[in-house]
Image: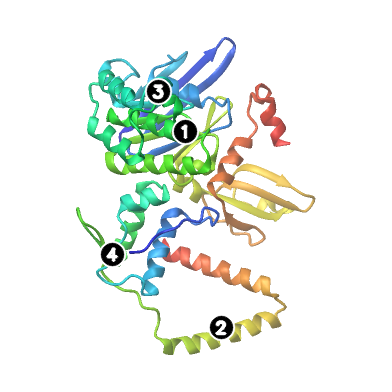
Amino acid sequence: MIEFHLDSRSGVSPYLQIVHQVRHALRLGLLREGDQLPTVKDVVSSLAINPNTVLKAYKELEHGGLVAARPGVGTFVTKGLTSAPLVALGPLRQDLQRWLAKARRAGLDDESIEALFIDCFRSDSEEDVA
Amino acid sequence: MTAVLTANGLGKRYGRRWALENCTLEIPAGQVVGLVGPNGAGKTTLMHLAVGLLTPTTGSIEVLGGRPAESPAQLGRVGFVAQETPVYESMSVADHLRFGDWLNPTWDQQVADRRIDQLGLDRSQKAGKLSGGQRAQLALTLAIAKRPELLILDEPVASLDPLARREFLQSLMEVVAEQQVSVVLSSHLVSDLERVCDYLVVLVASHVQLTGGIENLLAAHVRLTGPRSGLETLPPSLQIIEASHTDRQSTLIARVDEPILDPAWLVERINLEDLVLAYMRQIQPDASARPHLVEAHR
């Protein structure tokens, strides 16, 4: 079982934070196929959030095929999320390093690089969600 | 979708002063509605009109399809917790429950007992000896044990410390999860409402300034930062809620329906607090009636 937390300063809507936390736990193997997610009531009473928010998050996860609701019992993980195989990481890392070198040559400092990366990453993941 | 509350041109005047003016609203059912606004904006007046403690000067209000307090049945369908969560100081917790049972035909003793046990309240304790948080919880228990379809709470957490505040909102959300009740609660603090509400009504200086589902509202508003000279490149449909300028830069909070194409403008999401504050700061036609609000704006 995992526990959710909310960061109200992040600007990310609460339901998306829950979705992200479930996906994160799946990716890290903290949640596996067959595991139960906290019940809506548990989440509501531990976080003092609107039940609709939790339902919306679970529905979104269900829509993505990661979990399934069993009426009257709870919501269960139906599919694990493993990160890309380690073999893929090496080349990706090289690409990123090359890109970083390029950004530095273009005169970007650390802060600008980070801002640019996060900005791109955000707009990309927003499209993903929408 | 059915509405739990519909107001049409609703107004309430005290002498020469309008506490609420020309309020037209439709609040959908099954939502937790946050009613926000500065102190004196008309929140309590609107709630008192909704429960029938006040009658309108102009216009009309319907709650759950009926006139507020028109019949005992109508009274039973709406639970109300007034400001400061009042209880009878000299009466014990058990007396409060008996009183609630006696006054409410739809009283559910099981709901009341379960909550009192959960809260660990001593039934023989006089309500005057309870902590602020416990008093608020007792008032909430009385309001929900009558099994209302709509629960109206006037600043329920305003006087509570942060822990009691969180506990109260937890209880309230548990009730929403268990009983499918619609909720309208007021606060002058947005942070209280951020997690619990899915619908927002902003009241400023006796007028409804903004209403809508919170997610839709947040998706429709952005903060724009760009060159002061760049204002004319923004789409004409853009609705500026708040603008501040330095000699070179402009920062806007605006409602946008179409993408901002000019790359000179940085577009950022805003949070609920930014959104509400922007609407609260909008200068009112009768701003003279609220001098402290105008001052805060400077």
Disc number at residue B131? Answer: 1
Label 4 crowding class (10 Å Cα cut-off): few <14, some 14-19, many 20+? many
Of the numbered discs 4 and 2, the one sitting upstream in the chain is 4
Label 1 and label 4: CA atoms lie apart by 42 Å
Q: Position of residue A112 (x, y in %)?
A: 67, 71
In this rendering, which labeled residue sits more in front, label 4 or label 2?
A: 4
Q: Are marks 1 and 3 in contact (CB under 8 Å)?
A: no
* Vertical comparison of B14 with A104: above or below: above
Say which amino acid is labelled 1. Ser
Label 2 crowding class (10 Å Cα cut-off): few <14, some 14-19, many 20+? few
Q: Is residue B193 left or right of residue A44?
A: right
Q: Are marks 2 and 1 on the same chain?
A: no
Q: Nearest the camera: B208 or B260? A: B208
* Vertical comparison of B44 with B269: above or below: above
Per the image, the residue denoted by label 2 is A96
Q: Position of residue A83 (x, y in %)?
A: 39, 79
Determine the chain carrying the residue at label 3.
Answer: B
Label 3 and label 4: CA atoms lie apart by 41 Å
Say which amino acid is labelled 3. Ala
- In the picture, the quarter occupied by the C terminus of chain A is bottom left
Q: Nearest the camera: A27 or B225? A: A27
Of the numbered discs 1 and 3, the one sitting upstream in the chain is 3
Per the image, the residue denoted by label 4 is A67
In this rendering, which labeled residue sits more in front, label 1 or label 3?
A: 1
